[in-house]
Amino acid sequence: NNESWAAIICGDAAVGKNIWMRCDVTAHFADSFDLLGIVDEVRTTLELASGIRYVVDDVPDLDWVKEVQSNWKPFVAGGFLLKFPWHTQDDVKDAIKLHNTLQVEEDQKTKMEDEYYQLLLEGGIAFGTGEHPTTQLCLSWITQLFKEDNGIKMFLDYGAGSGVLGIAACVLNDSLQAVGVEIDVDAIRIADVNAENNGMNMKSYLPRNIGSDDESASLIMKAMKRAKVDILPETMDGQYFDACAANILAGPLVSLCSTIASMVRSGGEIGLSGILEWQSEDVLEAYSEFFDDVKVADSKEGWILITGSRNQKPVKI
C-alpha cells in the first residue's frame, strides 16, 4: 500500500507525513542490465494495474566527480581562498565579494583580494575542498596556531585527503615541513600534486600500519603499486611532529587516539574535527589521556573543533 511504500522510501517517520500519489524515480544501471525485466519486476512488486511510464537516456562516460566539481565556486575559509584550475580571476573576485558581503552583515572585518592566501586545488576524488564546516574550523585553527610564536617546524595532516590543511600550514610558515597520512592512495597522489602546484613543502604517505586485516592490507598494497605512493618513513614513526590536524570522523578519531598521540611531541598541539556536537564526549574522553586542556574550541553548523596539548604520558601501541 501507499503507506508501506512511503516507509520504504523515507523510513517509518514518513508514514502519514509524506505519502505521494506519484513518484518520479531516476535510477542508473549498467548497459548490460535487463531494463524491461526490472520495469516488470517493479510493476509486480508494487501490484500496479498498468505498466510504468519510463524513458531511457544514455549517460556519457565522464569523470563525474570532476564534472560535479566543475560547478563549484572558489571558497573563502579561515583567511584562505580555495580555487580549482578552471576558476577565472572573475570567479575569484565574485567569491571574495560574496564573502565580504556576508562579513559586513555579521559585523566582521572584510579583506581585499591580495590579503587572502590563495590555494590551488586539483579536482578529483580527494576530500577537502574548504567548503565543509569542519575544513573551515581546521583552517581557522591553523591560522590562529601560526599567529603565535610556537616554534612549529613539523606539521602532521592525519587523514590528509586533498592535503589542504597541511598546505595551508606551509603557506603560513615557509620554513615548515608538512606530512600527510592517508589510507586512500588516489587521495595521496592528488595531495602531492596540490602541494607541488602550490609550491609547498608537503608530502603524503600511507600509514605504517596499512590494514587491520590481511585482505585490507593486500588491497592497499596493490593500489600502492598502481599509484606509486610510499609508506610513512620509519624515521617519522615516533613523537616527531609539533602539531597535528586531523579532520576525519569521530569514530576513527577515537580509534586513532593512541596513533596520533604517539606521533605528536610533548607540548605539541592538536586540532581535531569531523565531529558532530553530540559526539564530543567520546572524543574528549579518548584524547584526555594523552593531551592536556582538551576542549571544544570552536563550532560551526553542528560540527565542532577539539584542541589539546600533548602531555608526557607514553603511548603503548
Image: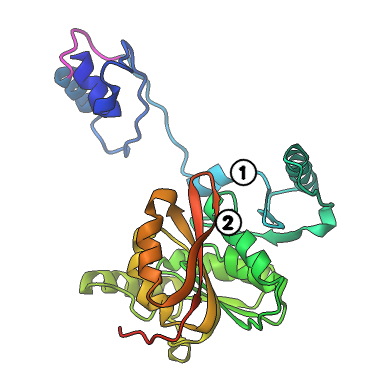
CA neighbours of label 2 inside 10 A, class few (<14), some (14 to 19), many (20+) = many
Outermost residue, top direction?
Answer: 49
In the rendered image of this protein, does residue 254 appear above or below residue 125? below
Residue 165 painted magenta? no
Does the residue at mark 1 contact the one at mark 2 (Cβ under 8 Å)?
Answer: no
Q: How is the image coloured?
A: rainbow
Image coordinates of residue 285 in percent, x first then y, are: 36, 66
Which dot, 1 or 2, sits closer to the camera? 2
Q: Residue at x 67, y 66 (%)?
A: 144
Q: Residue at x 74, y 43 (%)?
A: 103
Image coordinates of residue 168 in percent, x first then y, are: 65, 66
The label number, if any, that marks residue 72 in the structure image = 1
Kind of residue at disc 1: Trp
In the rendered image of this protein, does residue 79 appear above or below residue 204? above
Residue 193 visible in the shown view: no
The label number, if any, that marks residue 137 in the structure image = 2
Along the horizontal axis of the image, is 230 left or right of 172? left
CA neighbours of label 1 inside 10 A, class few (<14), some (14 to 19), many (20+) = some
Residue 30, picture quadrant: top left
Position of the N terminus by quadrant: top left
Residues rendered magenta in the picture: 46-52
Along the horizontal axis of the image, is 251 left or right of 133? left
Q: Residue at x 28, y 26 (%)?
A: 13
Kind of residue at disc 2: Leu
